[in-house]
Image: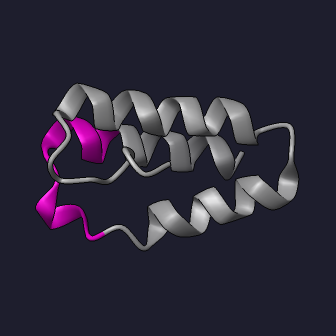
Amino acid sequence: LDHMLAPQESIGVQALSIRMAYQLCKSEPELLKELQLILENADTEYYSTGVNTTIRNILKKINK
């Protein structure tokens, strides 16, 4: 989780970390809610379009 929104990581590492965190958390509702809170509170203006798109797509999957 440390790599998800770390600005020193590359865009690919950030996006992959977000997707992997979702895969790991989707079987545990409590963890999924925590991931949702982390992603919703991320200040998206500091991240690339790729990371913002990944955040938006994962939040859509969580809210289904």
Q: Position of residue 27 (x, y in %)?
A: 86, 37
Relative to residue 49, is residue 37 depicted above or below? below
Q: Position of residue 50 (x, y in %)?
A: 21, 35
Q: Position of residue 21 (x, y in %)?
A: 58, 39
Relative to residue 44, is residue 56 depicted above or below? above
Tell me which colouring the rendered structure shows. one colour
Please report the residue visible at 60 percent of the width from the left and 60 percent of the height from the top.
36
Please report the residue visible at 73 percent of the width from the left and 53 percent of the height from the top.
32
Q: Main secondary structure of the magenta part?
A: helix
Relative to residue 12, is residue 42 depicted above or below? below
Please report the residue visible at 46 percent of the width from the left and 39 percent of the height from the top.
18
Q: Quadrant of residue 54?
A: top left
Q: In the image, which residues are magenta?
A: 43-53
Relative to residue 6, is residue 61 depicted above or below? above
* Horizontal side, residue 30 vs residue 50: left or right: right
**Where does the C terminus fall, quadrant-wise?**
top right
